[in-house]
Amino acid sequence: MGSERPLRFVIIGAGMSGILSAIKLQEAGFDDFTIYEKADRLGGTWRENTYPGIACDVPSHLYSYSFEPNPEWSHRFSPGEEIEAYFERVAHKYGVDGRIHFGEEVTRCAFERGRWRLETKSGRREEADVVIAATGVLHHPNLPDLAGLDAFEGALFHSARWDHGVRLDGRRLGIVGTGSTAVQIVSALVDRVARLSLFQRTAQWIMPQDNPAYSEAEKEGFRRHPEQMRQLHQDLSQLFAQGFSNAVVDASSPQMKMIEDLCRANLESSVADPGLREKLRPSYRAACKRLIISPDFYQAIQKPNAELVTEGIERVEPRGVRTRDGRLRELDVLVLATGFRADRFVRPMHVVGERGQPLDQRWAQRPDAYLSISVPGFPNFFMLNGPNGPVGNFSLIEVAELQIAYILQLTELLRAGRCRTLCPTEEATGRFEAEREVAAKRTVWTTGCRSWYLDDRGIPAVWPWTFDRFREEMARPKLEAWTQAG
Ligand SMILES: Cc1cc2nc3c(=O)[nH]c(=O)nc-3n(C[C@H](O)[C@H](O)[C@H](O)COP(=O)(O)OP(=O)(O)OC[C@H]3O[C@@H](n4cnc5c(N)ncnc54)[C@H](O)[C@@H]3O)c2cc1C
């Protein structure tokens, strides 16, 4: 047993996960930490995605830190700007906002002579014993490979780079993509634009879900009785774990059938025109792709000025989008709601492990990590919401909270002087990956659709077991899976 050792931490990223990490480090008495954030504000996803209609699609009282319930949520699924403001407020309340260096993109992070040496784009240098990479998963916009995109003469942007200087009222709007983002944009804008064309490659199942506002009396109740909010958080967490997360990992479960029935009934009862209904009917099972939650998408797409375009896109032209049937839809604004490159994780940051191995080399085929947290050969380097972790229709805040609690148990070993470095063994990581792949093949994500969950082999790159199992796994590190050195 060694003596207590001071540890220096660097957190990369000031989104939900980075703020959480800072708060939890502070709470555990680790005061020597700095956060680097490449942007000029915190908030990550919620700073970057400002498109009309943006809201969380898990209930706000679940999409909150468990230790910081918020009585002020305006809606069951609150808008993005409220969520961003929430993270700002929490960071300030816990005094971690002052620890963020904004406008500093970490470009290199190398483990040399027993410590992490970091460099930022501006040339700043930094050292740390422990790095927490909270760099996000849905962060790098995915741009579609459409011929002629550059030639478009109207306004063109990705949904995560919304250009608020562009006028929308009374104009002709095209949207490429049919994920959650596109669905939210359609509902928010259909009544404002002259014409809306939604270019659909794949139809989506839509789970109906109302989004009522909280009344002043309800908010007052939450303010007076924070324990009610905590209970609500717990109940929702339970509901999502039992009803959804556990359903998708067992494609033949009764919960899965219930979700499918709800989605099918929503389509049948909401879309009047049989032709349109068939165009909107997916050819795969509900929840195979990330399930979309919307109270009003079907109503929006049936408005007279809306059109669902299912012909494939031939090319983009200066005046609009030409589909394979030769038709040109003239447009003023074209939005690419085409999602994110979800396999990037900490990249393009150049991470170099203890034997000089670049992470990029290890991940050349696809990213891996033990329990989605850490990679063999990269000591004291921990990721939040890293590769192959739980994703789906539940709160990633909950995931990150469980992960940081696990990481803190490991860093206690470092602080106690039990060892100087910790990284998962190759054996444990290989076994985890092998078991994960087998289990992943039984999930609903492999039941016949293309989605961003699938890796280059068609295997879902996600946590394939129940959320309860994730909780259990995160509760206590199995130390035999970790190499403790020094
Ligand atoms: C439109 C949209 C809706 C979503 N809705 C939900 C939802 O309803 N429920 C849910 O659970 N999840 C949702 N998500 C997922 C969402 O990304 C997570 O919930 C959460 O916000 C992720 O937080 P994060 O801190 O891990 O990552 P991010 O929010 O992506 O933050 C990462 C931060 O790291 C910074 N960064 C990255 N690389 C570097 C670097 N090298 N140097 C310095 N800084 C760096 C980035 O600038 C960013 O600020 C949604 C995502 C999107 C895109």
Image: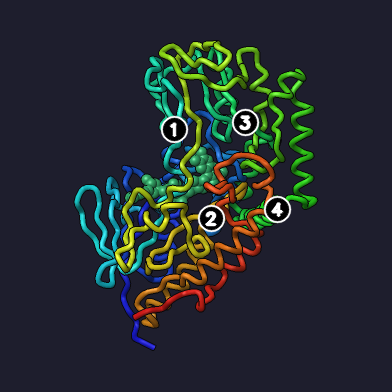
| SS at mark 1 in the image | loop
Amino acid type shown at disc 3? Thr
325 lies above or below 451: above
Q: Say which label, 1 or 4, has the lower sequence index.
A: 1
Amino acid type shown at disc 2? Asn
- Residue ID for mark 3: 202
Nearest to the observer: residue 364 or residue 66: 364
Q: Say which label, 2 or 1, has the lower sequence index.
A: 1
Q: What residue is drawn where x is 53% and y is 37%?
A: 79
Q: What residue is drawn where x is 35% and y is 63%?
A: 131
Q: Residue 143 — which label?
A: 1
- Residue ID for mark 4: 239
Residue 208 image position (x, y, % from top left): 71, 35
Pointer 2: residues within 10 angstroms few (<14), some, or many (20+)?
many
Q: CA distance from mark 3 to mark 1?
A: 17 Å
- Total count of labels: 4
- Can residue 334 be seen at all in this image of the molecule? yes
78 lies above or below 306: below
- Residue ID for mark 2: 388
Residue 324 image position (x, y, % from top left): 56, 17
Residue 452 image position (x, y, % from top left): 55, 42
